[in-house]
């Protein structure tokens, strides 16, 4: 992939962020602690992450493709053909990525 391929770079960043968000686990609610009771040290603020299967990741990527296609249709109806074309390019790129893997 060329370093200057802005469509690919943008859509990959966005999709990786969606995958990263899907890995997040909602932390357990904690009651306020006094400063002396707060956890300290390396890793004290680390949160566990969910491990996604390849199927989970493929579903997330498919959802990204679908949301871009829907948004492109909305932009097209609103008369913004340039933005609609960009979103279709992004959806096409992700679709090709799905079929290649």
Image (tube, rainbow, N blue to C red):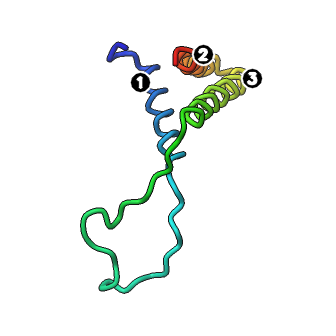
- Residue 27 in picture, x, y percent from top left: 50, 64
* Contact between labelled residues 2 and 1, with CB atoms less than 8 Å apart: no
Horizontal relation, residue 78 to residue 53: left or right: right
Horizontal relation, residue 16 to residue 95: left or right: left
Which residue is pictured at 52% across the width and 41% down the height? 52
Q: Distance between the residues labelled 3 and 2?
A: 12 Å
- Compared to residue 41, the image places residue 22 above or below, namely above
Q: Which residue does the numbered mark 3 point to in the structure image?
A: 77
Q: Distance between the residues labelled 1 and 3?
A: 27 Å
Q: In which quarter of the image is residue 39?
A: bottom left
Residue closer to the observer: 18 or 89? 18
First in sequence: mark 1 or mark 2?
Answer: 1
* Residue 81 seen in the figure: yes
- Compared to residue 78, the image places residue 39 above or below, namely below
* Contact between labelled residues 2 and 3, with CB atoms less than 8 Å apart: no
Which residue is pictured at 37% across the width and 14% down the height? 1
Q: Which residue does the numbered mark 1 point to in the structure image?
A: 9
Horizontal relation, residue 76 to residue 18: left or right: right
């Amino acid at each position: 992939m060329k370093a200057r391929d802005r469509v690919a770079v943008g859509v990959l960043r966005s999709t990786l962020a969606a995958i990263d968000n899907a890995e997040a686990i909602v932390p357990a609610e904690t009651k306020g602690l006094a400063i002396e009771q707060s956890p300290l040290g390396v890793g004290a603020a680390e949160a566990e992450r969910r491990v996604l299967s390849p199927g989970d990741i493929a579903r997330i990527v498919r959802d990204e493709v679908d949301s871009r296609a829907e948004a492109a249709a909305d932009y097209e109806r609103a008369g913004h053909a340039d933005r609609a074309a960009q979103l279709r390019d992004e959806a096409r790129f992700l679709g090709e990525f799905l079929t290649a893997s």
